[in-house]
Image (cartoon, rainbow, N blue to C red):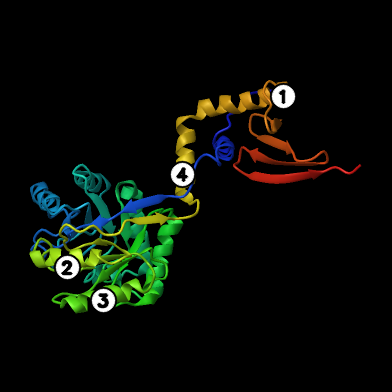
């Protein structure tokens, strides 16, 4: 028998053998604390990825965020808003450098995928934004904490369009929380597929008005980041309102400043194996291809020679230069066997055998 390279299907074998020991659900624990408006837009982290900002400016912003005790930084992936700096294309090398600048200072980037007041983007249609956010995910997904699909989404997208954008991210393999941010007020239809409500209460509210806005959002039963409530997140009033927000169960973060209060910690479970999990296995196989090949041959040899009392029997049904099928069979009773076959094209088949006397 000529030896064949097993490749990806062995990853399936390893996956099945270790399924009980490796958890597939992703867990994110976070109390999100950010300050995306400092002296309005002068030191806004939404400008972080723009080519119009300098690294000196970024260093000043980091100092302010660290002084505020922030854990996260809100950054914008696409914006033509004249009040902020322009970000109109994905620059993988530059973006990764800029995001790592935050991460190196213990600030986790939160990626906002498109801004309001950007008609240059909207007029190109929803598919254009889908393509753009896919570029963002390809470039920097491993560096960001989570996503906000759009800023003030209801100004330019319908609820259905927002849900399409979120579903596209899931189809893309994004396995992180996705938030939705709207103009002041709560519109439940926009949050249908969102994991987190990014709440804008509005500015210049009394404490009772501020509390009422938070309570209205919490009634929807989803985690809430009280995101936008003051134009200067380092002010005493902004910090007081941030502390008020954190007094509510279900509020998992603030975005415009906070004092010493701690918000509720969010535990997020995607609850399913997504494309990214298989990507991890493929990466593992690419790095350990030879070892996995030897492992599979050893498994078949051990099974054939009865050197170890395995809970199943492993055999090569076929093995040629271009094709193979590895079969694992486990007896259930004297007359019933169950098993699985794994082919070199990646196809897996579960089967059962019943024998009649």
Between disc 1 and disc 3, the foreground one is 3
Looking at the image, how many numbered discs can be counted on the residues? 4
Q: Earlier in the sequence, mark 4 or mark 3?
A: 3
The answer to whether residue 182 is left or right of residue 293 is: left
Residue carrying label 4: 279
| Neighbourhood count class around disc 2 (C-alpha, 10 Å): few under 14, some 14–19, many 20 upward | many
Q: Which residue is mark 2?
A: 241
- In space, the residues marked 2 and 3 are separated at their CA atoms by 12 Å
The reply to whether the C-beta atoms of the residues labelled 1 and 4 are less than 8 Å apart is no
CB contact under 8 Å: marks 1 and 2: no
Quadrant of the drawing holding the C terminus: top right
- Across and down, in percent, residue 55 comes to 11, 47
The residue shown at (25%, 65%) is 247
Quote the CA–CA distance across marks 1 and 3.
68 Å
Q: Earlier in the sequence, mark 1 or mark 4?
A: 4
Name the disc covering residue 213, or none: 3
Q: Which mark is residue 304?
A: 1
- Residue drawn 75% across the image and 41% down it: 332
SS assignment at label 2: helix
């Amino acid at each position: 028998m000529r030896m064949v390279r097993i490749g990806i299907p062995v990853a399936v074998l390893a996956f099945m053998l270790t399924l009980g020991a490796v958890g597939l659900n992703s867990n994110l624990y976070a109390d999100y604390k950010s300050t995306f408006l400092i002296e309005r837009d002068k030191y806004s982290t939404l400008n972080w990825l723009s080519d119009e900002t300098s690294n000196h400016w970024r260093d000043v912003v980091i100092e302010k965020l660290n002084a505020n005790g922030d854990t996260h930084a809100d950054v914008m992936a696409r914006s033509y808003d004249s009040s902020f700096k322009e970000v109109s294309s994905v620059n993988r090398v530059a973006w990764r450098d800029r995001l790592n600048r935050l991460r190196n200072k213990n600030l986790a980037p939160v990626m906002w995928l498109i801004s309001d007041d950007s008609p240059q983007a909207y007029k190109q249609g929803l598919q254009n934004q889908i393509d753009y956010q896919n570029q963002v995910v390809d470039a920097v997904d491993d560096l960001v904490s989570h996503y906000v699909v759009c800023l003030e989404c209801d100004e330019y997208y319908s609820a259905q369009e927002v849900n399409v954008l979120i579903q596209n991210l899931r189809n893309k393999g994004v396995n992180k929380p996705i938030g939705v941010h709207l103009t002041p007020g709560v519109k439940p239809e926009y949050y249908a597929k969102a994991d987190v409500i990014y709440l804008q209460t509005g500015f210049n509210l009394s404490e009772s008005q501020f509390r009422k806005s938070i309570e209205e959002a919490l009634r929807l039963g989803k985690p809430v980041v009280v995101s936008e409530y003051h134009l200067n997140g380092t002010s005493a009033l902004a910090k007081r309102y941030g502390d008020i927000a954190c007094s509510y169960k279900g509020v998992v973060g603030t975005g415009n400043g906070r004092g010493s209060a701690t918000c509720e910690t969010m535990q997020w479970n995607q609850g399913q194996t997504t494309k990214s999990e298989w990507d991890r296995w493929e990466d593992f196989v690419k790095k350990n291809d030879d070892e996995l090949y030897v492992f599979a041959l050893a498994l078949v040899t051990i099974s054939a020679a009865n050197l170890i009392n395995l809970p199943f029997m492993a055999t090569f049904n076929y093995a040629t230069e271009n094709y193979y099928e590895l079969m694992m069979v486990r007896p259930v009773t004297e007359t019933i066997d169950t098993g699985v076959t794994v082919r070199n094209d990646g196809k897996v088949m579960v089967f059962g055998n019943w024998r009649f006397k």
